[in-house]
Structures are given as C-alpha cells and as structure tokens.
Image: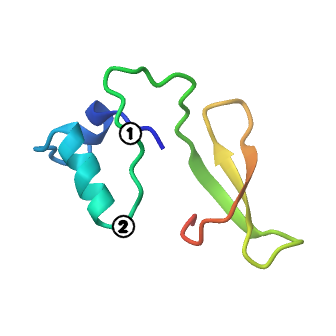
Amino acid sequence: MKISVNWLKEYIPVTHTVEEMANKISLTGIESSPVELGTELTGLVVGHVTSVKPHPDSDHLKVCMVDVGEDEDIQIVCGAPNVA
C-alpha cells in the first residue's frame, strides 16, 4: 500500500523520517516495501463503506457498498474481518 506522508500527518503527529517509519513498521512483523520518495499517488480514491453483507458463496468474504464520490455507490467484495 502506498500512502502520502502529508496525508498521514493530517491524522497523527509524524516525527520520524519516512525511512525510520518503514523500519519501525518492518520491526512489527509487517513487511514494508521499498520506500519511494517523491513519487506521486495517481488514481487514488478514498471511499466510505455504506453497507456490509455476508457474501452468499463464502463464509469469510463480505459484499460492501462503497461511496467513492460517484453518482452511485460501487460494490466491492472484501475479505477484511474489520471492514465494518
């Protein structure tokens, strides 16, 4: 996943360099991809989950309706247990 440090700063105080944050994330056991400074995030859309239903053919997937700023919500199938 790629994130903007400026976007992250809107939510939490950021006092470490990008490299230090990547190292700390790796130390928690979560893999951190190589850091790419100065690359733009294009095509990024932030959505709001408006409804969650169990997937009819799976015991762990969810069918979510997501508001991404278009005229109609879009359907996304998600496996995250904390999607709600």
Quarter of the image for residue 15 reads: top left
Labelled disc at residue 34: 1
- Residue 42 left/right relative to 16: right
Residue 25 position in % (x across, y down): 30, 57
Q: Work out how far the residue at label 1 is from the one at label 2, CA to CA, in angstroms.
A: 15 Å
26 horizontally vs 53: left or right: left
Total label count?
2
Q: Residues within 10 Å of mark 1 (few under 14, many from 20)?
A: few
Judged from the image, the secondary structure of the residue bearing numbered disc 1 is: loop
The image quadrant that residue 74 belongs to is top right
| Relative image position of residue 69 (x, y in whole percent) | 61, 32
Q: Amino acid at mark 1?
A: Pro
- The tag earlier along the polypeptide, 1 or 2, is 2
Which of 21 and 34 lies nearest the eye of the viewer? 34
Q: Tags 1 and 2 in contact by the CB under 8 Å rule?
A: no
- Determine if residue 50 is in view: yes
At x 74%, y 37%, the residue is 72
Question: For the view shown, which residue lies furthest in the left direction?
Answer: 15
* Outermost residue to the bottom: 59
Query: What is the x, y in percent for residue 68?
Result: 61, 37
Please tell me which residue is depicted at 22% across the width and 40% down the height of the picture: 19
Instruction: Give the label on residue 56, or none.
Output: none
From the image, tell me which residue sits under label 2: 29
Q: Residue at x 32, y 35 (%)?
A: 7
The C terminus appears in which quarter of the rendering? bottom right
Q: Which one is in front, 37 or 71? A: 37
